[in-house]
Image (tube, coloured by chain):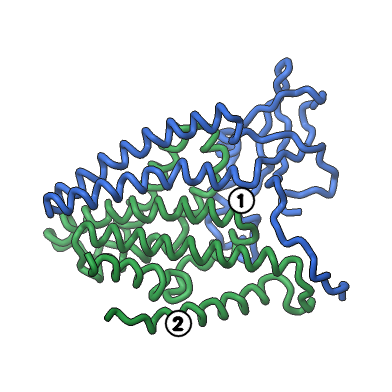
């Protein structure tokens, strides 16, 4: 149990997908102008990363490893991610058309989000069991959502602040992101004892 | 350079999240609208290299997101209007669509792992949990819809300078 808790803290905070591994930076800068869009994108990404990682683990364990097809890993995972996004879109549309109208716009963005593929490839590297892989993927995506929401909150305030024209927009956004990354580096000092 | 903000500036978000939509049809007292073509990120400096634009802006996707409003203000086809949803509606919708299925998936997986300790059993339990979660999400979405929490509301007619990012 302790092993899984540490795995999740490590994935969400210490090795944060955005601030430590620098994955998903396109959506990090693009969808964080408002908190509500950051929440929508974060939740959708959490769902897709978790579900696609479960499928990736199953395909890796049942097909790629036993038959020595490791060279097809990246292509296969991209295919699985695209299928997971389509599946999610289909399910949300069937479950509730109004929800699809509200949230559907975030789903295609996830297909091109490198964080989803990055987490899947990290799972293979980590050689985890199924529950460990799922918890790792879930915690990684929670870390992604957390940073997206924090950054969106900062940018909402920044939009009202008196920023010098030279730094207005993305430049000050990148400076804030680097400060946030420095702050998150503090989590690497967490003690497990 | 603009005047510095006063310390009592209200940083809270607006009570309605706004967007722009086009009226595409009027049927009796109901107007059908589609959201203005945009990606959720509103475009960025790397828009030409970003896959989101090509996927998210096709006519079919917009058509799929068509919605209706009660036309008691005389909207005509082709008009641009500003519509809004309550600021917490997106949060409620996200929790209903994604958090409930994820929670049931993880709880089912954790219970199966604790009881059986086998990857196959855990996997099966997780997919069953996902199915249960989707069913619960459907119930929750129905409840939100009945309360009108998910329905966009007409706010005003859009001016020529109004954009989805303004």
The chain letter under disc 2 is A
Q: Which chain is blue?
A: B
Q: Which chain is green?
A: A
Q: Residues within 10 Å of mark 2 (few under 14, many from 20)?
A: few
Is residue B140 visible to us here?
Answer: yes
The x, y position of residue B166, in whole percent, is 76, 54
Is residue A79 visible to us here?
Answer: no
Tell me whether circle 1 and circle 2 mark residues in contact (CB < 8 Å): no
**Residue in view at x 84 percent, y 49 percent:** B161
The x, y position of residue A23, in whole percent, is 45, 69
State the SS at label 2. Answer: helix
The answer to whether residue B40 is left or right of residue A23 is right
Q: Residues within 10 Å of mark 1 (few under 14, many from 20)?
A: many
The chain letter under disc 1 is B
In the picture, the quarter occupied by the N terminus of chain A is: bottom left
In the picture, the quarter occupied by the C terminus of chain A is: bottom left
The answer to whether residue A159 is left or right of residue A3 is right
**Marking on residue A63:** none
**Residue in view at x 53 percent, y 63 percent:** A148
**Residue in view at x 46 percent, y 34 percent:** B140
Q: Is residue A38 above or below residue A24?
A: above
Check if mark 1 and mark 2 are on a common chain.
Answer: no
Distance between mark 1 and mark 2 Cα atoms:
35 Å
The residue sitting at the top extreme is B28
- Which of the pair B39/A164 is nearer the observer? A164
Q: Which residue is mark 2?
A: A186
Q: Which residue is mark 1?
A: B39
Q: Is residue A125 above or below residue A27?
A: below
The answer to whether residue A182 is left or right of residue A155 is left
State the SS at label 1. Answer: loop
């Amino acid at each position: 149990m302790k092993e899984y808790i540490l795995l999740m803290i490590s994935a969400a905070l210490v090795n944060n997908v955005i601030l430590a591994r620098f994955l998903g930076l396109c959506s990090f800068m693009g969808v964080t102008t408002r908190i509500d869009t950051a929440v929508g994108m974060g939740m959708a990404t959490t769902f897709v990363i978790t579900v696609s990682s479960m499928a990736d683990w199953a395909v890796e364990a049942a097909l790629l490893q036993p038959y020595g097809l490791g060279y097809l890993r990246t292509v296969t995972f991209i295919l699985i991610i695209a299928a997971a996004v389509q599946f999610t879109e289909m399910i949300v549309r069937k479950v509730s058309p109004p929800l699809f109208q509200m949230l559907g716009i975030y789903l295609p963005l996830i297909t091109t989000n490198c964080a989803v593929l990055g987490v899947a490839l990290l799972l293979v590297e980590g050689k985890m069991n199924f529950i460990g892989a799922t918890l790792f993927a879930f915690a990684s995506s929670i870390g992604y959502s957390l940073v997206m929401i924090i950054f969106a909150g900062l940018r909402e305030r920044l939009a009202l602040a008196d920023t010098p024209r030279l730094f207005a927009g993305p430049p000050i956004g990148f400076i804030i992101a680097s400060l946030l990354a420095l702050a998150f580096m503090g989590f690497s000092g967490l003690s497990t004892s | 350079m603009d005047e510095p903000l006063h310390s009592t500036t209200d940083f809270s978000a607006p009570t309605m999240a706004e967007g722009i939509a086009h009226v595409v049809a009027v049927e009796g007292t109901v107007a059908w609208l589609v959201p203005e073509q945009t990606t959720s990120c509103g475009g960025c400096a790397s828009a030409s290299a970003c896959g989101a634009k090509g996927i998210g802006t096709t006519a079919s996707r917009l058509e799929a997101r068509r919605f209706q409003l009660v036309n008691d203000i005389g909207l005509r086809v082709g008009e641009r209007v500003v519509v809004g949803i309550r600021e917490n509606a997106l949060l409620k919708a996200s929790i209903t669509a994604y958090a409930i299925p994820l929670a049931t998936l993880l709880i089912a997986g954790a219970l199966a792992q604790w009881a059986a300790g086998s990857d196959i059993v855990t996997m099966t339990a997780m997919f069953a949990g996902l199915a249960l979660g989707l069913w619960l999400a459907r119930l929750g979405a129905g409840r939100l819809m009945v309360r009108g929490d998910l329905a966009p509301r007409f706010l005003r007619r859009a001016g020529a300078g109004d954009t989805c990012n303004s």
